[in-house]
Image: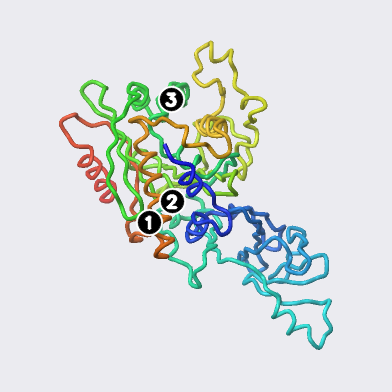
Amino acid sequence: MLNAADNTLLTRIGPGTPMGTMLREYWVPACRSAKLEADGAPEKVRLFGENFVAFRATDGRVGFLQEACPHRCASLRLARNEGNGLRCIFHGWKFSVDGECVDAPTEPRGQRERFAQSVPVRSHPTREAGGLVWVYMGAQETPPPFPDFEFTQLPDAHVFPLRGIIKTNWLQGLEALLDSAHVTFLHATNLDSAVGRSLFLEESDMMLGDGAPVFEFDEKPYGFTEGAIRTELGDQDYARVREVVLPFFSFIPAAPTGARIVCCSIPIDDETTAQWYISYDADAPVDGSNLTLMGNWSGDPDHFNSDMGDESNLWHQDREAMKAGHWSGIVNRGNPYEDFAVQESMGTIVDRSREYLGTCDRVIYRARRMLLDAVRSYESTSNVPFTGPQAELRTIRALSFAYPKTENWRDVRQALLTGHENA
C-alpha cells in the first residue's frame, strides 16, 4: 500500500505539481495526425489539466497553442484556420504555427506590428510519427530527443492508433496495462472465445491454466523488462515478457513477428486519462484487425470506448450472461472495456492506503517505487529519468512464448529476438 502523501505525489499532475512537472518533460501523444486537415477545424486537446488547440496550417505543419486567445480568452477552437495561422473570430488577432502573434488588426496601423510582437502566446513543439501528433510541454528551451520507438519509424499505413478515454487518474490506467495476473480472470471469457483462440492458439490455455504467474524483472535505463512466467502447465512453461518504458508505455507481449500493440496512459487531467492502443507491424500495413479482442468498439478512433457506459449502469454488465458462464458480464466487448470498467469502479483517484497487495502485484509495487524515486530525484537534480539510449528504444519487442522447463526464459527470448533480426 501507499501512504496518502505518496499517493498524492504520484497521481496529481496539474501545473506546478512535482509529478506534473516531470511528466511534461517527455514527448507525449496529443491526437491522431489524421484528425487534423490543412486549414481545417482546430482540435481541442486537454493534457495535464490544461486546454490547448492543435491545428494543421496551410503548408501542412502542425501548431499546438493555448486554447484561450491571449487577448480576451475566447476559444481558438472557433478560430479561422487560414494563411498558415489561426485568426480569432472575436477581434481578428492571428497566431502562427510557431506561437507568435502575427497580426492584431484592432491596433492602430502605426503600432500594429510592434504590438503584435509583444503579445505572449503559449505554444509547444510538435512532431508527427506513428500516425500521431506528439507534443513536448516541458521547460527546456531545446526539446529532448524524440522517442525512437520502432513504431515511430514506420510509414503511417503500418500504424493504427486508437484512443480510449477513461474517468480515472493516469496511474490507474498505467497499472492496468502492467498487470499480467488479471488476464487469467478478468479476460477469461474473451481468451476462451473463438476470436481469442484464433489469436492466441494454445497460449489461451496457458494463460487460463495458471492464475499465479511468477514475476522476474530486469532493470533497464528506460524502465524494466517484466517476465510473467506461468509454470503450472505440464511439461512446458509459458512466458509473457513485457517491456515497460516509464513513465507511460507498456509494450504488450506478442509473437516475434507480425502485428504488435503498445499502450500508453497519458493524463488528460487528475481524474481523466487518454488510453492509447497503438497497433503496428514493421513488415505490412495494419488496419486494426489484430485488435479484435477489443470487441465491438464504438467506431470512433478518437474515443473508441464512448459507448462503454458508466457507474450509473454498471458499464452495461449483464448478470444473466454471468450466470450463463461469462466471467465479467461485459458482453461482446473486448479486453480494454473490461479493464476500463474495473479501473473506473475504483473511483477517479483510488485510495491506495486501503489496498492489501499480494505476490501478483510485484510489478505494480515496482512501478510505483520507481516512479516515486524518479519524481523525487527529478525534483532535486532536474535530470529527466528513464531517458536511456535511443538505440534501446528502437529494438524493443515484447514477446510471449512457451518453452521447455529445462530452459531459461531469458535465453529463449534472446534467441527469438535474434532470429527476428536475422530473418
Q: Label 3, label 1: how many angstroms apart (C-alpha)?
A: 33 Å
Q: Label 2, label 1: how many angstroms apart (C-alpha)?
A: 8 Å
Please tell me whether residue 34 is drawn above or below residue 234 in the rendered image.
Answer: below
Please tell me whether residue 194 is drawn above or below residue 256 in the rendered image.
Answer: above
Mark 3 lies on residue:
191
Label 3: few (<14), some or many (≥20) within 10 Å? Answer: many
Q: Amino acid at mark 2?
A: Pro
Q: Nearer the viewer, mark 3 or mark 1?
A: 1
Please tell me whether residue 11 is drawn above or below residue 108 in the rendered image.
Answer: above
Residue 290 visible to an observer of this rendering: no
Secondary element under disc 1, as helix, strand or loop, is loop
What is the number of the mark on residue 247?
2
Q: Nearer the viewer, residue 118 or 136?
A: 118
Label 1: few (<14), some or many (≥20) within 10 Å? Answer: some
| Residue closest to the far top | 324
Q: Label 2, label 3: how many angstroms apart (C-alpha)?
A: 28 Å
Marks 2 & 3, CB-CB < 8 Å contact: no
The quadrant the N terminus occupies is top left
Q: Amino acid at mark 3?
A: Leu
N-terminal-most mark, 2 or 3: 3
Residue 245 visible to an observer of this rendering: yes
Mark 1 lies on residue:
386
Task: Find residue 237 and report its horizontal and vertical position in percent.
Answer: 25, 28
Q: Nearer the viewer, residue 281 or 386?
A: 386
Q: Quadrant of residue 385?
A: bottom left
Q: Which residue is drawn at the image coordinates 41% and 63% (left, top)?
A: 380
Q: Is residue 256 left or right of residue 115?
A: left
Task: Find residue 280 and report its horizontal and vertical position in percent.
Answer: 45, 46
Task: Find residue 159 and report its horizontal and vertical position in percent.
Answer: 49, 49
N-terminal-most mark, 2 or 1: 2
